[in-house]
């Protein structure tokens, strides 16, 4: 008997258009350039952009490729290292971290078509609803604000963000954390996501049913490909979120 449904966030419930992703990046770079100037640090735009991209590569190699996540402030320390800036002044890091994480708050991502309708329908059915998100540049504290602005935060019984948990999907611990927060056994939970490795495989190895969602259009928040060498067979595949209730009904048979 299915008692709970968990969801991935990016490209499953919310999406970034290419234009929005570009706008977010410009907001970060412009804002961080201003902070550096205010702190008397001369950092030309080309060096800042190179450091910004270098920080992402460093974090990918050191943490995210190992399914480990880190706080925003740690990412900023890597940016300073990449830019060869010696200062580790607390106020500088705080201000940069705020600018770095703010774009999604100021320009929140839209919901994927059918997401809000689906979440409300599942609530009306008496199912518990959970969320697991690998966060990247946008921490859980900001993503909660995004979901609140889209009027869906209150529909979730539990949310788990990788920067707060310390590990990313597909690590079993983050799925176990959701099961614990929902107080529903993994075997009675369906998890839905657009990444067959992180979402479907991750859920299945934790004992959940994994539903693969293939969106009609993908935005810019897509996880890098992983050479996992696995044969992953989802419990179901959908191309429209509104197909999910029928899939769940089939699992009850």
Image: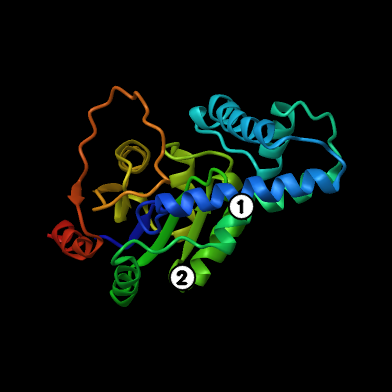
Q: Nearer the viewer, mark 2 or mark 1?
A: 1
Q: 121 or 251, which is in the foreground?
A: 121
Horizontal and vertical percent position of residue 243: 18, 62
Q: Can residue 179 be seen at all in this image of the molecule?
A: no
Residue in view at x 66 percent, y 49 percent: 30
Find disc 1 in the rendering and name its residue: 27
State the quadrant of the C terminus: bottom left
Q: Is residue 212 shown left or right of residue 18?
A: left
* Cα distance in 3D space between marks 2 and 1: 21 Å
Q: Earlier in the sequence, mark 2 or mark 1?
A: 1
Res 85 → quadrant = top right
Q: Confirm or deny contact between disc 2 and disc 1 (CB under 8 A).
A: no
Find disc 2 in the rendering and name its residue: 150
Residue in view at x 45 percent, y 66 percent: 156
Q: Tally the numbered discs.
A: 2
State the quadrant of the N terminus: bottom left
Query: Is residue 116 positioned above or below 191 on the image?
Result: below
Residue in view at x 32 percent, y 73 percent: 126
Horizontal and vertical percent position of residue 159: 50, 58
Residue in view at x 48 percent, y 49 percent: 21
């Amino acid at each position: 008997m299915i008692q709970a449904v968990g969801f991935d966030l990016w490209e499953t419930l919310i999406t970034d258009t290419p234009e929005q992703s570009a706008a977010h990046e410009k907001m970060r770079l412009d804002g961080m350039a201003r902070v550096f100037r205010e702190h008397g640090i001369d950092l030309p735009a080309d060096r800042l952009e190179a450091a910004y991209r270098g920080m992402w590569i460093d974090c990918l190699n050191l943490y995210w490729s190992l399914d480990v996540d880190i706080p925003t402030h740690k990412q900023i320390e890597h940016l300073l290292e990449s830019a060869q800036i010696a200062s580790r002044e607390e106020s500088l890091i705080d201000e940069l971290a705020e600018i770095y994480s703010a774009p999604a708050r100021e320009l929140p991502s839209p919901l994927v078509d059918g997401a809000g309708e689906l979440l409300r329908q599942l609530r009306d059915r008496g199912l518990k609803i959970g969320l697991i998100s690998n966060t990247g540049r946008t921490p859980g504290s900001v993503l909660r604000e995004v979901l609140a602005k889209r009027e869906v935060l209150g529909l979730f019984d539990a949310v788990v963000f990788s920067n707060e948990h310390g590990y990313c999907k597909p690590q079993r611990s983050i799925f176990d954390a959701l099961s614990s927060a929902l107080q529903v056994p993994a075997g009675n939970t369906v998890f839905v996501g657009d990444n067959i490795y992180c979402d479907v495989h991750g859920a299945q190895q934790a004992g959940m049913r994994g539903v693969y969602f293939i969106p009609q259009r993908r935005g810019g928040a897509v996880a890098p490909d992983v050479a996992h060498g696995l044969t992953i067979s989802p419990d179901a595949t959908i191309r429209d979120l509104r197909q999910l209730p029928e899939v769940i009904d089939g699992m009850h048979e």
